[in-house]
Structure formats: structure tokens, C-alpha cells
Image (cartoon, rainbow, N blue to C red):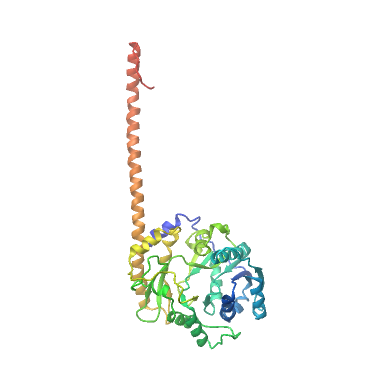
Amino acid sequence: MRSLCLLLFQNFSKSNLLTKYKILNNHNFYIPIIFWGKEYIDKLLHIYIRNILSKNNLPSLSKKANVKVCFYTTSEDYDVICRAGVISSLSKYSSVSFDPIQLGEQDTSEILAHYYFKTLKLAEGNGVVFYSGIDGVMSDGALLYVNSLLSFGFSVISGYGPRVNEDSFVSQLLKVTKCEKESDKPIEIGARELTHIGIANLHKDVISCDVSGKNFPDNPYLLLWKSNKENGFMVRCFNLHPYLVDCRKIQIPSQSEIEPIDFILIDKIINNLNDLYVITNSDNFCIWGLTNKDLHEFSFRTNTFMTYRVQHWIDSNSYANLNYVLPYYPIIFHCNGIDSDWKRLIKISKDVIDQVILKNTFERLQSYESLNLSRMIIFLLWRKLRAYVVKKIPMLKKIKKYYQSKNLHVNCKN
């Protein structure tokens, strides 16, 4: 069954070959940091910078790559972070550049897309780009892990970072890591500890996508299953985020082709599934998105999970081909390791995805087959009619000749 979905995806792929190459030493590793405004300055100074400065993130990564941190912000905001000592801290492990943002009538997503795209073009042919946004909090070693995957030749490393309630999550994070909010001490935390905090502070948008819940949205971007034995959950997602893009061996499309930049970027630049790696285990890479608890993407009402809702969402999606495949990657967030209960949950959820994806797929194939059948019948009828006419032409010629011999006119084509 899964092979059918993979086949559908491969129909628009350029190649079926996995290009493996040895990772170059000291490759360029670009990290764009795009922000403006006091709220995001606080996030940057108190959480994001301290988080990426944990031992097994930027400090360890700097020994394996030429890290280049690219700031895109207003001149006023850049002066603020310079006075806070951020640039001097980052300069120990990376080169730092600044490009002033021109704020105009564009909305936030357009500005973010523009400067992220600018970094992709900067890295084209010479480096890789890691982008999580300053709302992301990652486990210690996350940057090292995604960098290690480059040796397998993947063009895109993607995954899912669940939304969490910002205030309660940050409060618990600082308490567990014994860090003061105003301190410069790096925020260093392991994957399972961070997962435990994340699970305890999940945003309502994520919780609503639980297939056993009562507020399932009409336009879900993921399906969620809770573990019975431990405090953990598994998701099967649509529209995954491209965390790391290897720009050394791909051609970046024009900006108009990949806006909004997030998921569409994957759809545009990968050749086939062998170019895409989806991180499925929170032990390897764990990142959580800080979100205001009062900010919601869905409207909440009494609603239960139905496969047709997800089918409708896929049908109305302008880049549905890849979304036939992505839900087949089970992404697990756990605190105690993966045991037989998780394997059972993987099988149960896969059966649901088969119903959601394959039923929709077979309906498409049936309509396609019906169309082809109609065309084939018309074609066969035309062939028979043509054969009949061709067969009768000699007889028509004889009749014409007979009437001409009698000096009679007959309307008969040669």
C-alpha cells in the first residue's frame, strides 16, 4: 500500500538515484536570525542565543563547520543586541553578519520568507542553511545531529516541532536547567528532559489534533496519538518544516515559487524521497515552538476525528503529492525509550493513514481509469469505423466507375 503512495510521489520526481558523497570538511553552515521588535529581542537574548550556545550545539559544531550567523533586523534592534554582548559571545564560534531589514507594507510572513530566501541564495553552491526561527527551543546536540546527516547526501532534513505554551514552558525550562532569565549562562538540556517539559506544556492547537479527542479540527496539519504506557505521543504530519537545507548540490528556485517558504521549499527542491530525511525520534533531534497560549490556528468546537475531513484537506491542498507520503513517517516524542507499546501504536496509526490516504488515492485512480476507459472505447469505435470505410472504398470506386460509364453523375469521393 505504501508503495503506491511512494509511486505517486515519484511520478513528479526528477531522478530515482540517491547521490551519496563524502561531506566536505569545514563546509559553510548558515544560521539566519530574523527578528524585530522588543518582544523578539527578549526571546533572542534570554532563550534562543543561550540555547544554541549549549555545549553540543554551536561550540561543538564550530569544530566541524564554518558557522556563519546572519542577522536580519533593524539597525536600532541590532544596536540593542550588540550592547547586550550577544555578538561577542557568538563571535567565539562563528562569523557574524548584519543585513538591515526594510520594514514596509509587507506582512510578517513575507519579510521572514524574503530574508530566509536571501540566506538560501547566499549558501547556494557553497553551504547549508539551518533555520528554526527564534521561537524554537532545541535539545543539546540537535545541531550536531542534523549536521551529521549531511554525509548521506540528503538535500533536506525535516521534522516537526510541536507548539508549546510559551510562558509556562520557559518558566519550567529555566527551573530545570537552573538558569536565571537575565543570566548569560547557556541553556543546556538533554532531549528527554526537554521532551518531558514540552509534553507538559503542549499548546491547545496540538492537543486538538488527537484522533481520540472531541475538538478535532476540520483542517488538521497533523494526527496525534497518545501513548498508553508513558507520558509521550506520536504524530503523523503534513507540511513538515525544512530545518536543514543543503544548498551545495541543488538549485534554489525563484522566491516567487517558494512563498510561503516553509513546506513548499521541500516540494520544489528535492528530486525524490531519497533526497528527503524526516527525523522521527525525539532522542535524536528535539525542538519545541514557543507560542502564546491565547494564539490559536483552529476554531474549537465539538468535533470528532473523521477520515473524510483529512481527505478533504489533502484534496484542497495545492501541493498534495508530497502529503500523500509524509504521514507515513511516524514522529515519536518520548521520555523512556521506544518499546513494544510504541510499535503497536505505529501499526495502529499506519492503518488509519492507509484509510485516510489510500482510500482517497484509489478514488482518484478509479476516476482516472474511468476516464481512460471512455477514451479507449471511443478510440476502438473510431478504429472499427475507419476499418469499415477503408474496406468499402474499392466497392465505392467500382460503383462510381459504373455510373460514369453510363454518363451518370455520382457524388463519390476517391
Q: Is residue 271 left or right of residue 211?
A: right
Answer left or right for 287 relative to 313: right
Residue 65 visible to the viewer: yes
In the image, 15 versus 206, the foreground residue is 206
| Quarter of the figure that contains the N terminus | bottom left
Query: Which image quadrant is residue 294 in?
Result: bottom left
Counting from the top left corner in percent of width and height, residue 154 is at 53, 65
In the shown orientation, is residue 362 left or right of residue 61? left
Instruction: Give how far across and how far down residue 357 sits, in percent.
Output: 37, 62
Rendered position, 40 above or below 412: below
- Left or right: where does residue 202 sit relative to residue 26? left
Which residue is at a point 51% across and 65% down the rendered structure image? Answer: 262
Q: What residue is shown at x 34% (from left), y 28% (from top)?
A: 389
Q: How far across and how far down the image is residue 303, in percent?
A: 33, 69
Give the residue drawn at x 56%, y 78%: 43
Q: Would you place residue 172 above or below residue 152 in this image?
A: below
The quadrant in which residue 32 appears is bottom right
Where 392 sits versus 77, above or below?
Answer: above
Q: How many marks?
A: 0
Image quarter of the C terminus:
top left
- From where the camera sits, is residue 247 visible? no
Residue 349 place in picture, x, y as percent: 36, 70
In this rendering, the answer to whether 100 lies above or below 382 is below
